[in-house]
Amino acid sequence: MLVSLNWLKQYVDLGSETPESLADKITKTGIEVEGIEYVSEKLNHVVVGYVESCEKHPDADKLNVTIVNVGTETIQIVCGAPNVKAGQHVIVAKVGAVLPGNFKIKKAKLRGVESNGMICSLQELGVKEQFVPKDLADGIFVFDEEVEVGRDVTSYLNLDDAILELGLTPNRSDALSMLGVAYEVAAILNEKVQLPNVSYNTSTKRASELVNVEVEAKEDNPYYGAFVAKNITIKASPLWMRNYLMAAGIRPINNVVDITNYVLLEYGQPLHAFDLDKFGSNQIVVRRAEAEEKFKTLDEEVRTLNAEHLVITNGERPHALAGVMGGFESEVSETTRTILLEAAYFDGKRVRQAVKDHGLRSESSTRFEKGVDPNRVKKAGFRALHLLEKYADATICQGVSEYDALDYEEKDVVITTERINERLGTTISDDEIIVILNKLQFNYTQSGSSFTVHVPTRRQDITIFEDMLEEVARIYGYDHLDYTLPEGGQFAGKLTERQALKRFVKQVMEGAGLSEAITYSLTTTERATRLVAPDIKVKAVSPVRLAMPMSEEHSTLRLSILPELLAVASYNQARKEKDIALYEIGTVFVSDEKEVTKQPKELNRLSGVMQGAWLSHPFQQEQKSVDFYVAKGIVETLIERLGVDVQFTKADIDGMHPGRTAEIFANNQSIGFIGQVHPTLAKTYDLKEIYVFDLDLEYLYDAVDVEPRFVQIPRFPSMSRDIALVMDGVTPSGEVLSTIKSAAGEHLYSVHVFDVYQGDNLPEGKKSLAFNLRYLDPTRTLTDEEVEASYMHVLEAVKARHGAVLRA
Amino acid sequence: MQEKLHALKEEALTKVAQAEDLKALEAVRVGYLGKKGPMTEVLRGMGKLSPEERPVVGELANKVREAITTALEEKKQRFEADVLNTQLKTETIDVTLPGRPVNLGGPHLLTSIVTEIEDLFIGMGFDIKEGPEVETDYYNFEALNLPKDHPARDMQDSFYITEELLLRTHTSPVQARTMGEYRGNKPVKMICPGKVYRRDTDDATHSHQFTQVEGLYVDKNVRMSDLKGVLNQFAKQFFGEEREIRLRPSFFPFTEPSVEMDISCKVCHGKGCSVCKQTGWIEILGGGMVHPDVLKMAGYDPEIYSGFAFGMGPERIAMLKYGVDDIRHFYTNDQRFLTQYHKA
Ligand SMILES: [Zn+2]
């Protein structure tokens, strides 16, 4: 809502407030002023001039030499505007004037002819293009009504106006009118509101004799009033009205249209003027449109309507889409002599439907959608008639032809001083409540500390105690509320075990060199199904798609974070960031339905991508790229720290390298995978050797087994044995390790691989694995014999199970 | 005999002083203190002395031996130090060359901000609550006083999956869920951070996915001044003690009265500058007193219970606090962007 302060002053005394101070007060009281716009800068020596004569310049085709009376003198001005003519009243910047842009007007000679000033366009006075009427865009401004020669033009042209841009929250539709803003400002400044003049003379003819109103769609249209104004003269509206409309961002058209727009802005009540001579009947019927009913709106578009739309008809065909737009057929034009003025209350839902279906949001529809003030509907009509009589020479018919089932009653809300103070934490007195209610101009009935507030119908947003609480609080001033801390019991806040674990997982990842990324949950349907972990794949029937995506790019909820992380890797690589180590903890969305009807399961995953240099210390000749084991080491470290037992098994997963991928199992349950992305898939991202991992955090969070309790540090030394075994090259070391673990007996403390060898000195297809075994008994020193016995057991077992023999 | 010992001592100390390397020193030691050396000889001759002389000479002999040993030891240490110093000199490296870097990652800026907010509110006794990102229409809208035909919930603004399911447009449904879980009979004091989604075209200031942190406090006799106090405490801790807060009336369907909170501009301290669009204030969060209908729907009697709620956007906070100029940076994950915020 754009609010001209000069206009606002017609209703409320702004005292000594500057635009800035007023804006600050309005913002603090509840309506945000998003900007202040000045129509022009302060101008001196710019006056009304009368062009007495206008002759062609002797030496320049495009210039005119004019003699202009500026009140105190008559001066010669050379003017280049195409529309300058003798007999015009124009804007003259006299010598000494300084126009916006520090443009100083001096005595000058133009092609040998003396010029003592300048005839100006509105733009030259600093008026912004958007406020200038279209027909004035290319020339000087010419006054079309009586003005006093020699007078300062500022007030004629409303150049000293400031316009506040109000950002209205949905509840404050009352401020979609100048009067509404006036009530708000009056409450802030403790002033009264001066209401506009709504009186007019009437002819003996009654409106009801000329038109009859019948409302069929009573729910949609509880009030319809039809006024009739005859003998209209269509012309320009008064300059002051045009100025205010321009300030409000509306381009002036002609007096009738301008008056309906002016009253719309003044009262917040949309009006519509039909050319009664073109209406085609004297019968107004308000009804729902029929299916496929056609209607040409005044923008000359033919609209196809349906039963969801409300129309104003002449008993046969529509002449307006109620509250949204009038019809082309009965549009007011140059030749209009009689108008039918509609002042109605249309239900917001009906209007919203039409706006949505036809993409026609307007100043009118916006107000109907939010709900207009019942008590202003008819009054706005009166106001328009007052202006039509004055500025369109109209003869007004008596009365109104109407259908009226509107609820005009004010709603009561009871407040008590005690409850107000309880909820605000204040110590406001009864008297202060009274002051606040008076400022708001709300009537009330007092009974001790209890007030029954009769909320005026202009404030449709106030229906319950809390609404009044806010009114009291904002007029009292949010600034004046104390800073207190809740008096209720103080409890300690705390992370849940899961939340703490999530932070722990992040620490491990970051300590291991990975940076956290956050990607979008919405992706393409194709990407949503890439690199889905086996445990997710068995649960997800199909990816969850949006009903109406904005684009295919963000149409489907992801089933894996990895495709998004690969896209991030690709993005970085394209920018020469080739060493990549990223992780993300996020949700994947798993639905077990083909057609989704219930919320999908949201499962927490930890995913990572890694490629490029892992260890780089060039002058020490240390260079190591990320490989499977780097990634696996990170995953193992995390899982070990969480105290979970897992096994890695070679796996075949879509999109993964068939020889370099392991599925991770815990308790025979698949909980993720790790490996190199298949080169074919990597290539679609312009990537080459890139490693990924994906873990089921839901499982890990639940399985965590780390209860820190003291374990005695071994007092007896452990004993160590190395064992190098030769076996088939394809035998997985993990299986050999398991065999050793189960065969070595109770004293085996730890076992790990310390060497893998394949090549010279070994038969083709064979490899050697070397293990280090450590034995320990916390209660005593083990004997060599005991260790030897276990060692022999191990040898037998690996031979039996894997055909592995001691390396010679 | 005693004179002989004195002479021996002088002689030996001179030799020690003259020794030029460890080998020469060892020769001196063997020469004087060795089994065949003069000291041994002297001691061997002790037997011939009278019982009166014996302790005197014995003591002297020990002193002489000690003096020689000490001198030898000192000189030896000096030689060893020299040897070590020579060796260390050859081991000198260029200490100005770079060390081997430790691979350290770090959190995403949004996570850092959310974590900081979480910790501040945990310190004020709030718990952290989470909830689903795919929400039911009921929890996302209806339970928050946004009935089906409410203009603020146009289909155009949300990502619907079915008529009843959508991507949550705020984290407020977590509040409704938590209140429901507590069944209207115990206080609620919670923060709910999380991802939210709106039908916006991604540009410098809009993102179809973004982050929210919302808070809720419901108890008996919660006052609007408590909201002001808690938010003030948060703002001072998070943005700095010198920052002032200002509450302005606003509107949200789920709070009444509603507020918007501004903090004083860091750049101009309230005087007005381009950062704060000349207002001296920067909008940071929205909130208000929980709407009685929201309390009622969650099973809390608004005659007994009252509360406040608030919500803020970590992206916006990050943009203000660190001058990030485009919201898309948060989701592009350019490593050069991510690592900027990994420092302490
Ligand atoms: Zn500033």
Image (spheres, coloured by chain):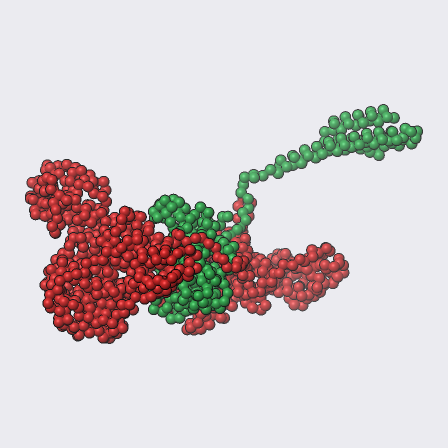
Q: Let me know if residue B100 appears in the view.
A: yes
- Direction from residue A159 to residue B177 in the image, left or right: right
User: In terms of image quadrants, where is residue A754?
Assistant: bottom right
Chain coloured red in this rendering: A
Q: Nearer the viewer, residue A730 or B192?
A: B192
Query: Exactly how many numbered labels are in the figure?
Result: 0
Q: Quadrant of the C terminus of chain A?
A: bottom right
Going 19% across and 52% down the picture, which residue do you hit? A243
User: In terms of image quadrants, where is residue A719?
Assistant: bottom right
x and y percentages locating residue B293 in the rendered image:
40, 66
Find the residue positioned furthest to the front: A448
Q: Quadrant of the N terminus of chain A?
A: bottom left
Going 46% across and 61% down the picture, which residue do you hit? B221
Q: Let me know if residue A629 appears in the view.
A: no
x and y percentages locating residue A379 in the rendered image:
21, 63
Q: Nearer the viewer, residue A115 or A518?
A: A115
Chain coloured green in this rendering: B
- Direction from residue A592 to residue A780 in the image, left or right: right
x and y percentages locating residue A168 in the rendered image:
31, 58
**Image height check: is B131 above or below A571?**
below
Going 16% across and 44% down the picture, which residue do you hit? A152
Going 16% across and 73% down the picture, which residue do you hit? A212
Q: Nearer the viewer, residue A340 or A659?
A: A340
x and y percentages locating residue A491 in the rendered image:
53, 59
